[in-house]
Amino acid sequence: MSAEIEEQKQYALNVDRDQDDKATEIKLCSFARPHMRAFHFAWWGFFIAFFIWFAIAPLLPLIKEDLGLSAQDIWTTNICAVAFDICMRFVFGAVCDKYGARVPMGCVLMLASIPTACIGLVNSLTGLICIRLFIGLAGSTFVMCQCWATRMFTKEIVGMVNGLVGGWGNVGGGATQLVMGTLLFPLFKVITDGDVSKAWRTVTLVPAAVAFTTGICVICFSEDCPKGYYKDLKKSGEMPEVSAAASFRGGAVDINTWMLFIQYACCFGVELTVNNAAVSYFVKRFELTIESASAIASIFGFMNIFARGLGGWASDKANGKLRMRGRILVQAALLILEGCCIFIFAEMGNLAASVVMLTVLSIF
């Protein structure tokens, strides 16, 4: 065991021994274990989670018509898709403290792939609500994504790293609009001889299969932390046992937790609303086809390729000068700008202007 531990301490990246062997640098083109392997699995796992979470979104206008649902019914399902995610994020924060992020992320991806594959069995509003409720479990992988990256990289660069893994993961919200609505759905219409109902009922089998496979790979081909696996470190005495319940209580009674909760609810709440409603909005307001509306809606998600990383970089720079107050000021400024953009976007009556404002809004 001691020889194995000694060997494990030789890393492909420079590390800070005083910060539990966390990496002090990031090499995007490297997949070396444990740091960069965890980095890439963190963003890819969250990407796939976002993909299946909103795979149904570009198909909602068709589902609404096929099942005879009202606009209010669709909004109800959108709320349910988010509700379960909110509850499970509270739970998985404590779970990651105890078991690490690797196994929970893999398990959630595999579990969420099951209701995703079952979307085609829906025949009523109740069925759609239940399916979307349980698919919402996928959204909780954000907790594992951020926890994993924080466990692997030092505080000097963790803002940028978390921005990258979170942002690239969020791109799944844009990719699913484009892939599901513009590529896969038309392909499945051809496969089903133009049967629109059969096409939307079968197309979600593809992302479900990808999510399940990803979950297996995350568990089998990565580590929990720089020094290996939590279970091995606890057995050797290098890591103390952590109580999930105590961890949850500690976070729940901290006022800073709830302040950040409110701020993130404002920011991420907008993102969830746009991901759920963008296609339906452009179809209804500008009378676009599903394929065209999906392509436009995908812009919002694809901007995360650089936008979150840029926010993390700005936060790290502000932290270097003003400590935590700097991070808070950056976040507050971005939230104010986002709010202004929302009001402007809502007033756009021209398609081109709406697309431009959607692009600007997505940066914040």
Image: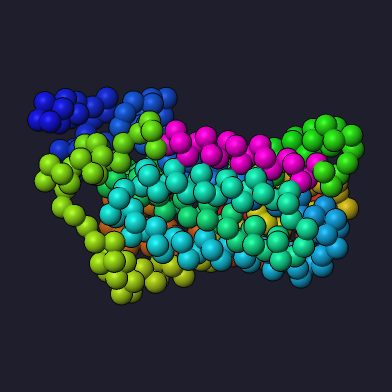
Is 202 in the magenta? yes
* Residue 289 relative to residue 169: left or right: right
Residue that appears at 38% across and 31% down: 221
Is 170 in the magenta? no
Q: How is the image coloured?
A: rainbow
Give percent across and percent down for residue 135.
59, 54
Give percent across and percent down for residue 305.
54, 40
Nearest the eye: 186 or 283:
186
Q: Number of callouts in the render?
A: 0
Give percent across and percent down for residue 157.
32, 43
Give percent across and percent down for residue 334.
50, 59
Residue that appears at 70% across and 60% down: 128
Give the magenta part as a residue range. Answer: 199-218
Q: Do we see residue 353 in this rendering?
A: no
- Per the picture, the main secondary structure of the magenta-coloured stretch is helix
Nearest the eye: 59 or 294:
59
